[in-house]
């Protein structure tokens, strides 16, 4: 099955809009001036500092006795902001001026594990345990799936990690469908999940 966006199936999420990424914008603006290795490394350090602060907020316990819609949205915004910072980290670390240190930096900062925990897994657990959160869950899965698709395209060094997580998120998306409609989205997402897992 073609994993690219299917124009006849509007239920499939689009890749992350890289033009909205601060890191993408910075590199685009500096392209004509050839950003130095130190500029990119400094930006990576800024991202690391920003994402560390967000992770503290992501791990902060929520109120006992249930989460209101406003509180849920606020927490999800933090998780999504962290996910954007992880995206920027990998985009920056994959820049030609520092690409030779990409795997070393990932090993030092453990960004793959941190992205999975704070940007992907924790928000899913939060939403699964919150009554009436299906629409929030769908929105977040689509946003995360789009970000992972962009990382798969932009940072092939970690393609095995991206394909595994894309398979996971396609599976989560499948589980939200009943499979009894005219368009069997459950079957579509099952096929997408199997296709990603088959690329590992």
Image (cartoon, helix red, strand yellow):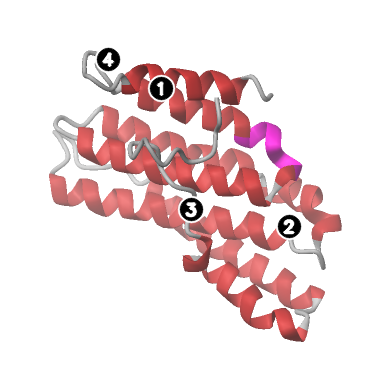
- Residue drawn at x 66%, y 67% is 45
Question: Can you identify the residue that label 1 sits on?
Answer: 188
- Tell which circle, 4 or 1, labels the residue nearer the N-terminal end: 4
Question: Can you identify the residue that label 2 sits on?
Answer: 94
Helix or strand or loop: what does disc 4 sit on?
Answer: loop
Instruction: Write down the region rendered in magenta.
Output: 157-162
Task: Name the front one of labels 3 and 2.
Answer: 3
Bin the neighbour count of mark 3 within 10 Å (Cα to Cα): few under 14, some 14-19, many 20 and up: many
Helix or strand or loop: what does disc 3 sit on?
Answer: loop
Task: Name the front one of labels 4 and 2.
Answer: 4
Label 4, label 2: how many angstroms apart (C-alpha)? 40 Å
Question: Outermost residue, top direction?
Answer: 180
Give the percent coordinates (x, y) of residue 10.
Answer: 33, 40
Question: Marks 4 and 3: CB-CB under 8 Å?
Answer: no
Q: Is residue 159 magenta?
A: yes
Compared with residue 108, is residue 170 higher up or lower down, i.e. above or below?
above
Give the percent coordinates (x, y) of residue 135.
Answer: 21, 38
Compared with residue 67, is residue 40 higher up or lower down, i.e. above or below?
below
Question: Can you identify the residue that label 4 sits on?
Answer: 179
Question: Can you identify the residue that label 3 sits on?
Answer: 16
- Tell which circle, 1 or 3, labels the residue nearer the N-terminal end: 3
Label 3, label 2: how many angstroms apart (C-alpha)? 17 Å
Label 4, label 1: how many angstroms apart (C-alpha)? 10 Å
Most common secondary structure along the magenta stretch: helix
Q: Is residue 4 visible?
A: yes
């Amino acid at each position: 099955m073609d994993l690219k966006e299917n124009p006849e199936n509007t239920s499939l999420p689009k890749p992350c809009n890289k033009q909205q990424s601060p890191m993408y914008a910075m590199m685009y603006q500096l392209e004509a001036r050839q950003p130095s290795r130190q500029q990119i490394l400094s930006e990576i350090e800024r991202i690391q500092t920003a994402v560390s602060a967000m992770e503290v907020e992501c791990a902060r316990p929520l109120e006992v006795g249930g989460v209101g819609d406003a509180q849920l949205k606020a927490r999800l915004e933090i998780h999504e902001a962290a996910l954007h910072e992880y995206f920027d980290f990998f985009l920056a670390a994959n820049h030609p001026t520092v690409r030779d240190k990409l795997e070393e930096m990932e090993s030092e900062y453990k960004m793959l594990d941190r992205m999975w925990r704070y940007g992907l897994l924790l928000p899913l657990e939060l939403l699964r345990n919150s009554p009436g959160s299906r629409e929030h869950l769908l929105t977040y899965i689509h946003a995360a799936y789009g970000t992972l698709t962009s990382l798969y395209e932009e940072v092939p060094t970690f393609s095995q990690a991206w394909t595994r997580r894309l398979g996971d998120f396609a599976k989560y998306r499948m589980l939200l469908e009943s499979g009894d409609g005219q368009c069997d989205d459950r079957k579509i997402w099952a096929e997408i999940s199997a296709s990603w897992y088959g690329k590992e």
